Amino acid sequence: MAIKPDKPWFAAKRYGYGAGLPISWEGWLVLVLYLLIVIGAAAGLPLVLPEATAITALGVIVIVATLVFLVICIRKTRGGWRWRWGKD
């Protein structure tokens, strides 16, 4: 299965700014991977690192993962990210 570069992965929100739920398997995969990274880091880091280091590492991981996820969402949302009033 080849990934089409222009195929949207997320639907635009009907009202407001941003993306809604994924509309393709690629979007769902990105969302699940993001959640696994964040939840896995939150569950696993305290087991292997001292508390202060685990908290710092978790913060860095969550920030980086969120930024990467947002960039992907912005680039792969149908119609792009802009304010919507529900009619378009």
Image (cartoon, helix red, strand yellow):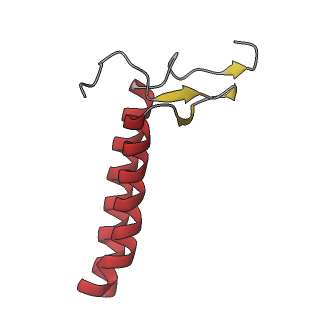
Q: Which residue: 30% across, 19% down?
A: 4
Could you tell whether 87 is left or right of 52 in the image?
right
Q: Is residue 17 above or below residue 32?
A: above
Can the viewer see residue 71 in this picture? no
**Residue 80: where, in percent of width, then height?**
50, 19
Quarter of the image with the C terminus is top right
Identity of the residue furthest to the top in this view: 88
Q: Is residue 33 above or below residue 58?
A: above
Q: How many marks?
A: 0
**Along the line of sight, which residue is nearer the eye, 43 or 29?**
29
Q: Which residue: 36% across, 75% down?
A: 55
Can the viewer see residue 12 in this picture? yes
Q: Which residue: 33% across, 42% down?
A: 68
**Residue 82: where, in percent of width, then height?**
58, 20
Quarter of the image with the N terminus is top left
**Residue 77: where, in percent of width, then height?**
48, 25
Q: Which residue: 33% across, 83% down?
A: 46
| Image quadrant assignment for residue 9 | top left
Q: Is residue 7 above or below residue 29?
A: above
**Residue 23: where, in percent of width, then height?**
51, 31
Could you tell whether 68 is left or right of 1 in the image?
right
| Image quadrant assignment for residue 50 | bottom left
**Along the line of sight, which residue is nearer the eye, 16 or 37?**
37
Could you tell whether 66 is left or right of 11 in the image?
left
